[in-house]
Image: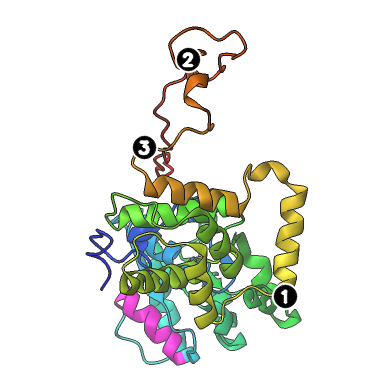
Amino acid sequence: MYREFFGLEDTPFTLTPDPRFIVFTPSYNEVLASLYYGLENAKGLIVLTGEVGTGKTTALRWILRRLDSSVLAAYVFNPRLSIDEFYHHVTQMLNIKDWTNKAELLQVMSRVLEERHRRGLRTVLIIDEAHELSDYVLEEIRLLMNFESDNAKHLQIVLTGQPELREKLNQPNLRQLKQRVALRCKMHALPNVDEVERYITERLLIGGSDQPNIFTPGAIDFIFQCSEGIPRQINNLCDNAMLAAYAAGEQIIGRQLIEEVADNLDLLPRREALLTNDKAVENVGSARVLTAEAREELWNNQAKAERPKPMFKTETPLTNGTNGNGSVNPHIQKSPFDDLDDDISLEIEEVGGFY
């Protein structure tokens, strides 16, 4: 609805896990590199955990789209499965049809996986929302890890879920599965305002914007406080804020509009969180040179004027050290800023991806 108003080709802040809009922040790069390393080196069982909305599913889909043609991958997104339903998923992936009982299925599966491994082919099973798996299905997953030769795993499994998955794996009855975990990855929320600003800017650029400075610094600061750095919450706030700005005919989104949107979404930060954030800012004074209010004022002034006004307000005679009639006034000192260019522009650094 607001795409044409903001000059966008696509909607940049949808809640769907679209890998086209992945933003390669340092923390996200670390997780993707770990997953790539685990799959490339056939580590066997990989566990990826993270809070709700941190982008786990987006990362998995990004990797799935970039797997080599020699890799056969199955993606299970509904973990509430019985043992029979779970094996139905696995057999569909491997195109195994002729089996009547579990023992026969395991024999056929062993031959198929061994043959694929002999031909240099990889087989990967990815299970999303794995914290919802029953203990019985998790035990079957442990048994599937026995498909191996002396020096390699024939089946790789990636379990991804919320922090509850770590707690589940710490249960005494699942200690054997826990010992099979070869690699653990953790997806973190965006840790600071700078990464949130980068996240918002890059998604606007991917969406086709040629002016990705729609949100003022004060607005981005408050988005960070309300979202706690969780990408899904950031998307929700930005999407609703752009819709509200479109309805109001405003092309620049400030803090006040974010406050209204956050209030409607019940995302206003708790008082304790605000106090903690203020204390953190005091401890890291060099992180931001200006206050949020000062940056907001600077941003608004820049948007209003095509050429900014001089940073220092002086009288006309002070600019050249003369009186009004052209003679030199010895009492008037020449400003040390006179030699600087009059045109002062603020530029936003172009942000690129990590390679």
The amino acid beneath tag 2 is Asn
Identify the image quadrant of residue 333: top right
Of marks 3 and 2, which one's residue comes earlier in the chain? Answer: 3
Query: Quick one: 185 or 122, which is closer to the camera?
Result: 185
What is the x, y in percent for residue 309? 44, 37
The amino acid beneath tag 1 is Asn
Residue labelled with disc 2: 320
Front tag of 3 and 2: 2
Does residue 285 sit above or below 57 in this rendering?
above
Give the residues in magenta: 84-95
Give the Cα distance between marks 1 and 2: 76 Å
Is residue 93 on the magenta stretch? yes
Give the Cα distance between marks 3 and 2: 22 Å
What main secondary structure does the magenta stretch of the protein show? helix
Q: Are marks 3 and 2 in contact (CB under 8 Å)?
A: no
Q: Residue at x 39, y 40 (%)?
A: 350
Give the Cα distance between marks 3 and 1: 61 Å
Residue labelled with disc 3: 307
